[in-house]
Amino acid sequence: MTSDISIRPVATKADRKAFIDLTYRINAADPNWVPPLKGEAYGAIDPDKNGWFSHAEAQLFLAEHGGKVVGRISAHLDTLALTMPLEQGFGSGTGFWGLFEAEDAQSAVALIERAEQWLREKGMNRALGPVSMSIWEEPGLLIKGHDHAPTVMMGHHRPEYQAWIEAAGYTPAKQLLTYELDITQELPPIVQRIIKSGEKNERIRVRRVDKSKFDQEAATILAILNDAWADNWGFVPLTQPEIDDVGKKLKPIVFEDLIMIAELDGEPVAFMITLPDLNEAIKPLNGSLLPFGWAKLLWWLRKPKVRTMRVPLMGVVKRLQSSRMASQLAFMMIEYIRRASVDVYGAKRGEIGWILDDNQGMVAIAETIESRINRVYQIYEKAL
């Protein structure tokens, strides 16, 4: 470890503040970085406020040089990830690091080495990173797309980090892609024909969610999600504490005409969640709701007008995934939400993702609607 860099565990309230504050200082000069609300940032590392900790443990570290905090990192284990099949990316012996920020290459190397040491002490023989901290939160390092701001719930990182991580002996494990498209334009004619065919099929019903039945609708979506994603690389089932936390966070930006459930013969078989880009509203707040940020945000949430809509999650039950029906249902949900996004919310741009680079079905759908890759996130791995 580099001798003039000291690494110490986060242990006090002051340490946690330094851990959170560092990211605002390091990224302050980046015009495309979106400062997260500090309450959310603190909640993510608080076991009492993040349901992920119900099946995981983490240690946070700070790097210091000359009495100044110059970097941070988390080292963590997910007990559910340890039980997943090795061929799906995680499995026995796999630990993680994330929440990574560093001022320079020296600090970066020292932080990664300390995270690796912690993982070895826990019996891990492989490290994946950055994953901050659940795979469902902000996985991967941004390696393409630094020239524009991230959408809601997506990460944004300094371009220097790629070389620093690779210099520490890490190699690519998986890429996560996001796609963008101009949603003011109608979908291609072939897609429109597929949609019209679906609308004539009496077996198909595509409906909005009913927010008055939030818990019931969430359970329906979760059942489809766990079935649809079960074989995907990096899949870890969501637990009830996580679902409860996500529900609290997302409920204010859940709008019925932006979330669709597709039914086949009366059975829910597919869903699509779309969120207005909350980052557009919180970026000017610089991480704080005081003194008047809370009022501005509440006003925005009443009827948001946004440039961008993000599709963070979409799924079709496994038994239909290789069928023509899967893409037909997807195109129908995309079109109905596209119309609402433009007509009701004034949106002009859509972003879909993240999508695994080897998810052929979703990649094909993204390409068929003439979207293009705008951001690439890289998850790295290293044997310990």
Image (cartoon, rainbow, N blue to C red):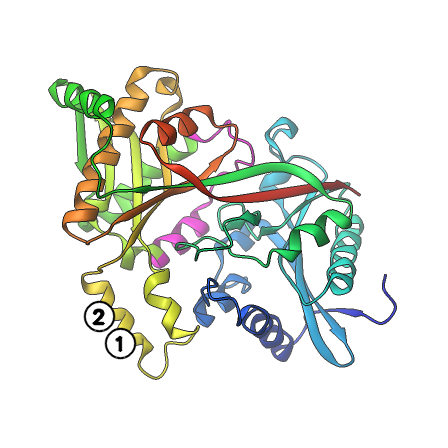
Determine the CA span between mark 2 and mark 1. 6 Å
Residue drawn at (55%, 63%), measured in percent from left and top? 45
Q: Report the side of 307 relative to 363 (left or right).
A: left
Q: Secondary structure at mark 1?
A: helix
Give the answer, above or below, for where 357 lies relative to 264.
below
Element under label 2? helix
- Does the magenta-highlighted stretch encompass residue 237? yes
Task: Please provide percent x and percent y for residue 19.
Answer: 61, 71
Which residue position holds label 1?
295
Which residue is more in the foreground, 75 or 369? 369
Say few, some or many: other residues with alpha carbon within 10 Å of mark 2 (under 14 / 14 to 19 / 20 or more).
Answer: few
Specify the amino acid type for callout 2: Trp
Image position of 68 with respect to 208: above or below: below
Residue contact between numbered discs 2 and 1, judged by CB atoms under 8 Å: yes
Is residue 233 located in the magenta-colored stretch of the structure?
yes
Specify the quadrant that holds the N terminus: bottom right
Q: From what the image shows, is residue 218 above or below residue 19? A: above
What's under tag 1, amino acid-wise? Ala
- Point out residue 153 in the picture as x, y percentages from the top left corner: 43, 54
Residue 101: assigned label? none
Q: Nearer the viewer, residue 129 or 267?
A: 129
Q: Can you identify the residue that label 2 sits on? A: 299
Q: Residue furthest top?
A: 323
Q: Image quarter for residue 322? A: top left
Decide if residue 79 is on the left or right side of residue 373. Answer: right
Which of 334 and 219 lies nearest the eye of the viewer? Answer: 334
**At which x and y percent is residue 69?**
69, 75
Give the residue drawn at x 36%, y 58%.
249
The magenta segment is: 228-249
The residue located at (26%, 26%) in the rendering is 329
Q: Position of residue 187 (x, y in %)?
A: 23, 32
Q: Quadrant of residue 311?
A: top left
